[in-house]
Amino acid sequence: MLILGLQGSPRKGGNTDTFLAAFLEKAAQAGAAVKTIQVARAGIVPCKGCGYCETHGTCVIADDPMSTEIFGLLREADLVVAATPVFFYGISAQLKVLIDRCQTLWSRKYVYKLKDPLAATRKGLLFSVAASQGRQLFDGIHLTAKYFFDAIDAQFSHALTYRGVESKGAIRQHEGLAADIDQTLQKTVLPLVNRKKVLFISPTGACRAPMAAAMAQQRYGDRIRTGFGGCSPGDALHEPMIRAMQRIGADMGYRTPRNVEQALYGTTPDLTIAIGNGVDEMPVPGKNVVRWSLPDPVSSDDAAMDRLRLEIEAHIDTLMPLIK
Ligand SMILES: Cc1cc2nc3c(=O)[nH]c(=O)nc-3n(C[C@H](O)[C@H](O)[C@H](O)COP(=O)(O)O)c2cc1C
């Protein structure tokens, strides 16, 4: 389970940064993998408003960290934390740059009608701080967060917002902070961390394993978290597989093959499914290993890929009783 923190303040060691780090430290202790993007220093290029994503499904700015890393992390994350100071009753300009680029994910969802495999369970959290006491201080931020979380297929869990916090580090003195973090862990983090972990492995981790992982995730996502890996991971997912999943409305975009150790962030799977012939002799992680014999995808035509998908789907029917 991955928590992605988007630290939206330009002030390093400031209130947003301090608060987010405290939350993520607790979440890591509870068993989550955590990753922070220091948005102000990430070098994200602003959206050009060119409309390319609405006609191609990908962003025209293909070589900045948003396209090469952050879209992938947003797809991988089970919980996305948007953390920002209030700047003129809105979110910081730095975080806004990242959010605007998510028009690409909005397009995949609303123009291409694709659904991310984690959509049913992904959550979004909002953290914000502001110096004054204004009644409507966080209204603008709430609205932006609501539409951001919708675009990235995350359900808006709740917001933790703090007034009267101005100087660097003042958030540490805020009463109730530890209790708020603890409640959020109980309510939002632990149900996601406590799901059983199922790892799918195929020779390259580019076709059968990601297909199976995505279908199992969609189907049983409230009970399991799947990961996929390859014994010798390829550079990119198999394009015909991506199209076969698109034909059932599943979005495999911005995902890449990974090695077996990275697939579940170093945690031990409760069940490992090794798919195909190439993995028969390979040592695979986990004590509970099941091997599925599914043919190598020799033909990449649509009909063959659809047959493979149906075959995997039939195996997925039998998955849950295998988990110990
Ligand atoms: C450009 C700018 C605009 C701000 N606008 C507001 C504001 O509209 N309302 C408010 O209460 N505080 C405002 N503040 C204060 C910050 O929200 C506050 O100092 C916050 O604690 C900074 O968080 P940080 O340490 O994470 O950067 C503003 C600060 C800056 C630098």
Image (cartoon, rainbow, N blue to C red):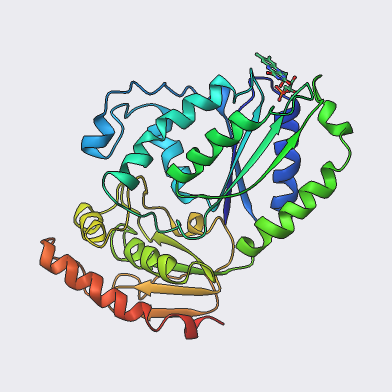
Instruction: Tell me which corner region of the image, top left, top right, bottom left or bottom right, holds residue 117.
Output: bottom left
**Horizontal side of residue 53 vs 126, given as left or right:** left
Place of residue 93 in the rendered image (x, y in percent of width and height, measured from the top left)? 55, 20
Q: Is residue 202 above or below residue 99?
A: below
Q: Is residue 127 above or below residue 204?
A: above
Place of residue 194 in the rendered image (x, y in percent of width and height, measured from the top left)? 64, 67
Q: Is residue 246 above or below residue 51?
A: below
Residue 31 visible: no
Q: Quadrant of ligand 1?
A: top right
Quadrant of the snapshot with the C terminus: bottom right
At 48% across and 39% down in the image, what residue appears? 147
Place of residue 113 in the rendered image (x, y in percent of width and height, measured from the top left)? 29, 51
Residue 95 visible: yes
Quadrant of the snapshot with the N terminus: bottom right
At 64% across and 24% down in the image, what residue appears? 9
At 39% across and 54% down in the image, what residue appears? 116
- Is 12 in front, or is 281? 12
Place of residue 321 in the rendered image (x, y in percent of width and height, measured from the top left)? 49, 86
- Is 42 in front, or is 236? 42
Q: Residue furthest front?
A: 135
